[in-house]
Image: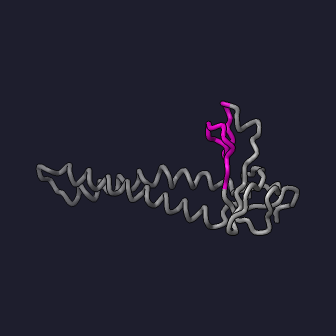
């Protein structure tokens, strides 16, 4: 399985979680090809919270996620709200019938579908972030 990997250093351990400061590479700052984890234009170091089991402050680590995670995240964040907006608008239009105020239920249904899609995206993101989706290993160790 293809993965996206990035190295970093554990800067803090708190309550079983580790805060990892990602190391910037050449791709992180080049305008034409930013890396997936440091896509921010900010000059501040990018930090990620991960499971800190077996880690200590100062450890060099490698974080990796499945490459397909980016596609799934993009769909959940951008595609799902649009699909649910269209579905909500269709339901609102069907409920309204052919009255003179037919556009109001369409707008309300579309807005409700869009907000439901955004809420779903936030919940999915929180579940993925807390599920150990990011694999952590000390730098130099082979991935099993």
Residue at horizontal 43 percent and vertical 59 percent from the top: 119
Q: Nearer the viewer, residue 10 or 38?
A: 10
Farthest left residue in view? 100
The N terminus - image quarter: bottom right
Residue 55 shown left or right of residue 87 in the figure: right
Farthest top residue in view? 31
Residue 12 shown left or right of residue 74 in the figure: right
Q: Is residue 119 magenta?
A: no
Residue at horizontal 79 percent and vertical 59 percent from the top: 57
Residue 100 shown left or right of residue 38 in the figure: left
Residue 139, horizontal then vertical, whole percent = 84, 56
Residue 132 shown left or right of residue 10 in the figure: left
Question: Which portion, as a residue range, is magenta?
Answer: 31-48
The correct choice, above or below, for 32 with respect to 140 in the image is above
Residue 78, horizontal then vertical, whole percent = 48, 49
Magenta-colored segment: predominant secondary structure = loop
Residue 54, horizontal then vertical, whole percent = 80, 68
Residue 60, horizontal then vertical, whole percent = 82, 54
The C terminus - image quarter: bottom right
Residue at horizontal 78 percent and vertical 50 percent from the top: 7
User: Which of the 4 quarters of the picture holds residue 14?
Assistant: bottom right
Residue at horizontal 46 percent and vertical 61 percent from the top: 120
């Amino acid at each position: 399985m293809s993965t996206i990997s990035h190295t970093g250093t554990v800067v803090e351990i708190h309550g079983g979680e580790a805060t990892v400061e990602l190391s910037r590479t050449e791709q992180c700052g080049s305008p034409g090809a930013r890396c997936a984890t440091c896509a921010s234009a900010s000059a501040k170091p990018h930090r990620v919270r991960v499971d800190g089991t077996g880690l200590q402050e100062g450890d060099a680590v490698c974080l990796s996620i499945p490459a397909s995670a980016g596609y799934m995240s993009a769909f959940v964040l951008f595609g799902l709200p649009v699909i649910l907006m269209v579905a909500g608008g269709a339901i609102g239009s069907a409920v309204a019938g052919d009255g003179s105020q037919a556009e109001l239920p369409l707008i309300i249904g579309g807005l409700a579908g869009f907000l439901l899609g955004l809420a779903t995206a936030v919940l999915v993101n929180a579940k993925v972030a807390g599920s150990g989706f990011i694999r952590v290993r000390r730098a130099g160790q082979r991935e099993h």
